[in-house]
Image (tube, rainbow, N blue to C red):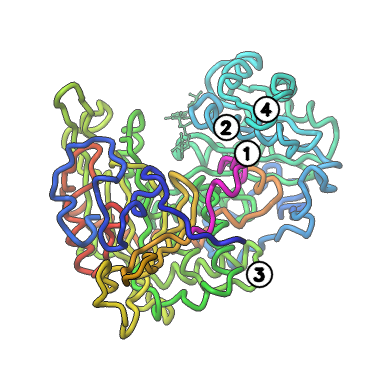
């Protein structure tokens, strides 16, 4: 890989790198949605801010519950999980399984937003790229009455073709739509699932039957759907897998209950718990960066790393999702799953192999080493509306589906500590928020000071502040860069900070597949690396459940922050407490 000392990225792509010194970020250059952000935010020097041929259910699964009623919740380490075989490295369409069997994808909740805007478009993108097998059929299932034609008309509005080869788009689209069907039924009716089964069998034409269910319905419906589908419309001679969309419970207790309920009807290796952010490039890139470059792994510990920040911000509010969000809040919606998964991949020990179970074993270990988050190490916030000039933006509680007195946080910052020899004493700061000034998803790694720094007294930089920083960013522009100190060319000795740009969008201009495409393809192949195992889920909930209980029991009021700002001022103080310099990160 060619390394280049790049000029600073554009302000929209790199808010931090537009400064002339690592230590003096000009907040004026940060992308702003609104320009009236209180000056207080810029005052502080600290942050404000294989293919599995058969699942274990192969054979007659109909009406069979593999775990008897009352089975206690077991760690999935105990469950037999079949690893994908070596064929996973060849395109799925060319695998023996794809050639010899039929594949039916059943989207349950097909009348909803997720199905329309994400799942069917992702399936079409895979079809367009010839990633789906010859004998592929898609079924939509929901209560709303709809004909096959009506489903096709609805989903055709959200299908798009790859920009780089759109010549045969219409033809491909009509081929895809011909393979899409709709079945209306109740989620708790075994009879209706039997009707679905009859229709699927017609399309399977007697071939080995593989069925992938995507549960795009509210979590209240999960258990009914899983029960009916596993009893009445699961495969008799191939595999049946079920993708379950997050949220997986609200806390340790409800999550364990959900797992237990699902395992009354499915084995662990049939359950694919999806957090779609895990399908983003960042997750795979992080592993490649860590484990395929000799230069990083030796630095990856408390000896060299001062702190790590995991940031996920959105420049829009809960618009339209207030009812769902108010029941969860930002800690459950983003931190407990997406950011914690990132942290686990970042901080885990090297896995024995890249096999899903080896990676997931390491993630579980590190998750179990994280101390439960303390209320003293958390700042919560909620965005408020703003009306002024010709601009008006709604506050969180202006949503008619949200109570005026809601204490649900739309922003949170938290310090996590990992109690193991590698990370002892290194603060991991998570920041997640809605209605902030920019949309961003990144990891920032700040390294320690240079000991006995020879250049500390030279003009142009304070190297105590300008430590090296590695930024791994997925949004707005995928990039990985390392901030280094260098000499400004000329007769004098002036130091400056530049970005050593390791990877950027310009180097790989091709279109990046949507996260759902990757995850759907993985589920078809039985590749579980990016799906969450039940013991991982338990460990993740253990980190946040005590905090969530305390926030709710004590009715802790979130700090209000203006829509489009950088979040609550309290984050400055939290960062200062742990000596985290994150003015570069814009919080
Ligand atoms: P919707 O609210 O649009 O629900 C999907 C379908 O489920 C609806 O069309 C409806 O179908 C059925 N449904 C809705 N509410 C109920 C209910 N109370 N009882 C029974 N059936 C109901 O959700 P989305 O499509 O937006 O999302 C689906 C799931 O995925 C949700 O659990 C959500 O939390 C999760 N999710 C969604 C994301 C997104 O981007 N939208 C992102 C991440 C997760 P019908 O009435 O026809 O049966």
Are circles 2 and 1 on residues that touch, CB within 8 Å? yes
The magenta span reads 501-519
At a point 17% along the width and 31% down the height, the residue shown is 386
Q: Earlier in the sequence, mark 3 or mark 2?
A: 2
Q: Which of marks 4 and 1 is in front?
A: 1
Query: On the rendered image, what quadrant is the N terminus found in?
Result: bottom right
Most foreground residue, 317 or 252: 317
Label 1's element?
strand
Tag 2's secondary structure?
Answer: strand
Crowd around label 4: few <14 · some 14–19 · many ≥20 (10 Å) = many
Disc 1 from disc 3: Cα separation: 29 Å
Taking 344 as reference, is 546 left or right?
Answer: left
Q: Residue at horizontal 23%, vertical 37%?
A: 563
- In the rendered image, residue 358, in percent from the top left (x then y), is placed at 61, 68
Q: Report the residue marked by disc 1.
A: 213
Q: Disc 2 versus disc 4: distance between alpha carbons?
A: 11 Å
Q: Nearer the viewer, mark 2 or mark 4?
A: 2
Q: Are marks 4 and 3 in contact (CB under 8 Å)?
A: no
CA–CA distance in space, label 3 to label 2 = 35 Å
Quadrant housing residue 318? top left
The residue carrying mark 3 is 353
Instruction: Indicate the position of residue 142 as horizontal and vertical percent values.
Output: 55, 25
Which quadrant of the structure image shows residue 32? Answer: top left
Q: Is residue 349 magenta-colored?
A: no
* Whole-number angstrom distance, CA of label 4 to CA of label 1: 12 Å
Q: Residue 338 carries which label?
A: none
In the foreground, 120 or 80 = 120
Q: Closer to the camera: disc 1 or disc 3?
A: 3
Q: Name the residue under label 4.
A: 196
Can residue 537 be seen by looking at this rendering?
Answer: no
């Amino acid at each position: 890989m060619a390394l280049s000392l790049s000029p600073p990225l554009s302000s929209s792509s790199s808010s931090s790198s537009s400064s002339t010194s690592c230590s003096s970020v000009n907040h004026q250059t940060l992308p702003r949605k609104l320009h009236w952000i209180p000056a207080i935010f810029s005052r502080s020097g600290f942050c404000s801010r294989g293919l599995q041929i058969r699942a274990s259910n192969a054979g007659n699964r109909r009406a069979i519950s593999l775990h008897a009623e009352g089975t206690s919740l077991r760690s999935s380490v105990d469950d037999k999980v079949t690893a994908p075989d070596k064929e996973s490295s060849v395109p799925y369409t060319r695998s023996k399984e794809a050639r010899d069997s039929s594949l039916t994808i059943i989207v349950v909740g097909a009348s909803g937003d997720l199905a329309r805007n994400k799942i069917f478009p992702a399936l079409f993108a895979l079809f367009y790229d010839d990633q789906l097998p010859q004998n592929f059929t898609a079924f939509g299932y929901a209560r709303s009455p709809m004909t096959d034609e009506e489903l096709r008309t609805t989903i055709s509005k959200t299908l798009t073709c790859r920009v780089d080869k759109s010549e045969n788009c219409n033809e491909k689209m009509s081929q895809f739509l011909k393979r899409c069907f709709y079945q209306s039924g109740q989620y708790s009716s075994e009879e209706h699932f039997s009707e679905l089964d009859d229709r699927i069998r017609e399309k399977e034409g007697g071939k080995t039957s593989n069925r992938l269910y995507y549960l795009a319905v509210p979590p209240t419906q999960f258990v009914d759907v899983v029960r009916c589908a596993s009893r009445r419309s699961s495969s008799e001679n191939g595999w049946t897998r079920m993708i379950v969309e997050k949220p997986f419970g609200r806390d340790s207790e409800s999550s364990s209950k959900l797992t237990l309920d699902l395992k009354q009807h499915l084995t662990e290796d049939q359950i694919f718990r999806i957090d779609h952010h895990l399908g983003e490039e960042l997750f795979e890139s992080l592993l490649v960066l860590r484990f395929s470059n000799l230069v990083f792994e030796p630095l990856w510990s408390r000896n060299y790393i001062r702190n790590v920040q995991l940031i996920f911000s959105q420049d829009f509010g809960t618009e339209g999702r207030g009812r769902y969000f108010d029941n969860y809040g930002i800690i459950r919606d983003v931190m407990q799953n997406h950011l914690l998964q990132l942290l686990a991949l970042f901080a885990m020990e090297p896995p024995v192999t890249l096999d899903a179970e080896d990676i997931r074993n390491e993630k579980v270990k590190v998750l179990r080493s994280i101390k439960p988050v303390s209320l003293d190490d958390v700042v919560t916030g909620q965005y408020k509306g703003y009306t002024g000039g010709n601009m008006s933006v709604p506050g969180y509680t202006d949503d008619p589906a949200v109570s005026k007195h809601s204490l649900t946080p739309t922003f949170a910052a938290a310090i996590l500590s990992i109690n193991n020899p590698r990370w002892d004493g290194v603060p991991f700061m998570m920041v997640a928020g809605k209605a902030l000034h920019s949309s961003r998803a990144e990891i920032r790694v700040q390294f320690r000071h240079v000991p006995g720094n020879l250049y500390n007294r030279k003009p142009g930089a304070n190297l105590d502040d300008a430590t090296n920083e590695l930024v791994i960013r997925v949004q707005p522009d995928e990039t990985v860069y390392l901030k280094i100190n260098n000499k400004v060319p000329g007769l004098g000795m002036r130091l400056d900070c530049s970005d050593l740009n390791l990877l950027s969008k310009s180097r790989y201009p091709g279109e990046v597949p949507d996260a759902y495409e990757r995850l759907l393809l993985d589920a078809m192949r039985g590749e579980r690396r990016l799906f969450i195992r039940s013991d991982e889920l338990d460990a993740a909930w253990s980190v946040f459940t005590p905090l969530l209980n305390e926030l709710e029991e004590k009715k802790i009021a979130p700090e209000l922050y203006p829509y489009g700002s950088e979040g609550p001022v309290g984050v400055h103080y939290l960062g200062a407490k742990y000596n985290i310099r994150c003015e570069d990160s814009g919080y």
